[in-house]
Image (spheres, rainbow, N blue to C red):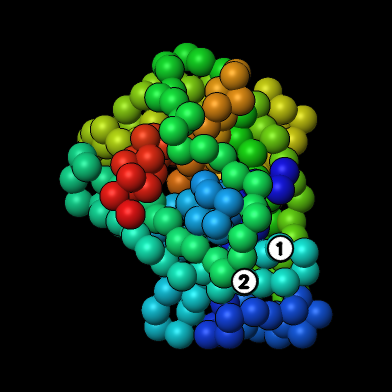
């Protein structure tokens, strides 16, 4: 989907980088983002969309990495108002995009699908970082169920988050979550293909992968304040 793109964190400050000229040792991490305006506005989670300490986030489009200028970012872990969201912009127009005015609230026990690019960042057996990284990754659509609309962990209730159980897909069954690194920032849609969430993190429970997602309405609120 052209509205979704891989995001790569690099030790660089260049505005544009051709992937053919990329030094893999500069790659720090991966994630996903999706466009929310034709003018290059891109939404993701804050731990994917960040800059500082010599590292910037880039959107990968047609073999070119475009530096993302961060417009708004919230990353808080201390209380029930936990947020992990960000909006940035690339210097490129005419993008296919998802309309934030059509975002919806997720419903408990509803069917959802996670869409994004997964990448293997490490050797599964040794857990050592892979060089070269898999820049492009594989586009995946992973079906699941919204377990609940409020995420709880370590006795902390996070009202801006929800959980998704992903276990009925051939891409997930008998696979370790280590094979699905780089999915942070992937969008989550409901049965009507409307965005309801944005994937933050995941982990294994048996053969199932449980995702921790942010309610998409928080991105909409951030968008309206720009």
Residue at 51% in and 15% down: 110
Q: Residue furthest top?
A: 109
Q: Are marks 1 and 2 in contact (CB under 8 Å)?
A: yes
User: Mark 2 or mark 1, which is nearer the start of the sequence?
Assistant: 1
**Which x, y percent locates residue 92?**
61, 65
> Would residue 184 be seen by someone viewing this image from the given angle?
no
| 109 is higher (above) or lower (below) than 174 | above
Give the residue at mark 2: 66
Residue at x 29% of width, y 50% of height: 225
Q: Secondary structure at mark 1?
A: strand
Q: Residue at x 65, y 47 (%)?
A: 96
Residue 82 appears in the picture as rendered: yes
Residue 61: numbered disc: 1
Residue at (49% x, 63% y) in the render = 89
Residue 62 appears in which quarter of the rendering? bottom right
Residue 34, position as x, y percentages in the image: 57, 49
């Amino acid at each position: 989907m052209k509205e979704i793109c891989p995001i790569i964190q690099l030790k660089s400050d260049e505005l544009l980088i051709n992937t053919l000229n990329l030094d893999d040792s500069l790659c720090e991490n991966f994630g996903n983002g999706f466009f929310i305006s034709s003018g290059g506005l891109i939404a993701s989670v804050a731990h994917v969309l960040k800059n500082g300490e010599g590292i910037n986030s880039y959107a990968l489009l047609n073999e070119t990495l475009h530096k993302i200028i961060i417009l708004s970012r919230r990353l808080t872990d201390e209380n029930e108002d936990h947020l992990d969201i960000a909006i940035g912009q690339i210097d490129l127009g005419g993008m296919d995009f998802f309309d934030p005015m059509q975002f919806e609230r997720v419903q408990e026990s509803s069917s959802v699908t996670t869409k994004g690019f997964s990448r293997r960042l490490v050797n599964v057996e040794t857990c050592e970082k892979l060089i070269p990284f898999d820049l492009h990754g594989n586009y995946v659509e992973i079906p699941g169920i919204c377990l609940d609309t409020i995420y709880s962990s370590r006795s902390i209730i996070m009202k801006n988050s929800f959980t998704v159980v992903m276990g009925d897909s051939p891409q997930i069954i008998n696979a370790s979550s280590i094979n699905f690194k780089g999915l942070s920032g992937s969008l989550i849609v409901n049965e009507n293909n409307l965005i309801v969430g944005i994937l933050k993190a995941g982990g294994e429970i048996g053969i199932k992968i449980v995702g921790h997602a942010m309610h998409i309405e928080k991105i909409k609120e951030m968008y309206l304040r720009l």
